[in-house]
Amino acid sequence: MTIKSITCFILLRRADLLRKENMTASISANHFLFLFLFLILSSSIAYTQQDEAFFINKSMDKKLLGLETEQLSHLRVYWHDVLSGNNPTSIEIVPPISDKFISGFGYIRMIDNALTEEQDRSSKLLGRAQGLYASASQDKVALLMAMNFVFTSGKYNGSSISLYGRNPWMEDVRELSVIGGSGLFRFARGYAKLHTVELDIAKGNAVVEYNIYIFHYADSIALF
């Protein structure tokens, strides 16, 4: 029996009881309250049923999505942060909030940095690092980084991984989290180890080696 049918039945039953009790045509406030609360309750039940229907299958077989075997892969790329020249790939979009912070606290840079196969910027282009980094510490040099590594060559063209975390860039080795991915890196998770291999303080340019360890369901990424 549907919610609508149950509601109609109860309303008719209440009307019959009112007639038997020889009540007047005007229904008392208590009866109005009863009907009002019942209609709210029936609506809540209906919405609950709709919400449950939204979850088509609460427990899915991973094989239906082609997620049969999870594997761990290692990817190494070189990240080129270019602030100088006629075609910088790192642009300041928000300046520091005050000169009193040696960390440059508050500044934000948007990036579209090249990812290459080797340290040399002219080596094979594997993709782009697109996102932003910001100075998130008042008293220490540390960046908040949020980037997508979008691959533009080879088998993984069009796939991407998302990295996020804290980068105290003056330290020798740092780590970021791999928090997801798309394409052949769906459901990706892992971490990246960062090591600066070139730094030009005067120009503000840097080359950083990224060794990324990823759990994923795609084929091996030995291509890189």
Image (cartoon, grey):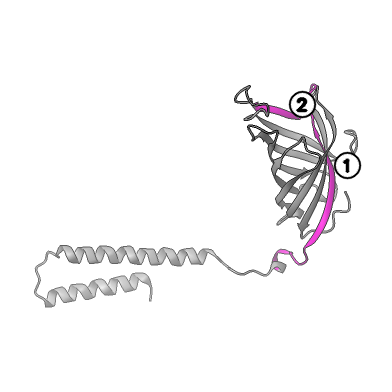
Circle on res. 49: none
Q: For marks 2 and 1, give the one nearer the viewer.
A: 2
Quarter holding residue 84:
top right
Residue 145 on image: x %, y %: 69, 39
- Residue 128 versus residue 83: which sits nearer the camera? 83
Q: Is residue 15 magenta?
A: no
Q: Position of residue 65 (x, y in %)?
A: 70, 64
Identity of the residue drawn at 9% across and 68% down: 24
What residue lies at 33% left-to-right and 65% top-to-bottom? 41
Question: Within 10 angstroms of label 2, few (less than 14), some, or many (20 or more) residues?
Answer: some
User: Given the image, on which type of amino acid does mark 1 rest?
Assistant: Glu
Q: Residue at x 90, y 33 (%)?
A: 122
Q: Disc 1 marks which residue?
A: 117
In the displayed structure, does residue 7 sit left or right of residue 15?
right
Which residue occupies the extreme front position in the image? 139
Q: Earlier in the sequence, mark 2 or mark 1?
A: 2
Please give left or right for residue 198 compared with residue 138 in the image: right
Q: Which residue is mark 2?
A: 83
Task: Identify which amino acid the numbered label 2 is placed on.
Answer: Leu
Question: In which quadrant will I find the N terminus?
Answer: bottom left
Tell me which segment is drawn in magenta.
64-93
Are the two marked residues, 2 and 1, in contact with CB atoms closer than 8 angstroms? no
Residue shown at the point (91%, 37%) measured from the top left: 123
Above or below, 100 relative to 81: above
The answer to if 86 sits in the magenta stretch is yes
Where is residue 111? Give x, y as percent: 72, 33
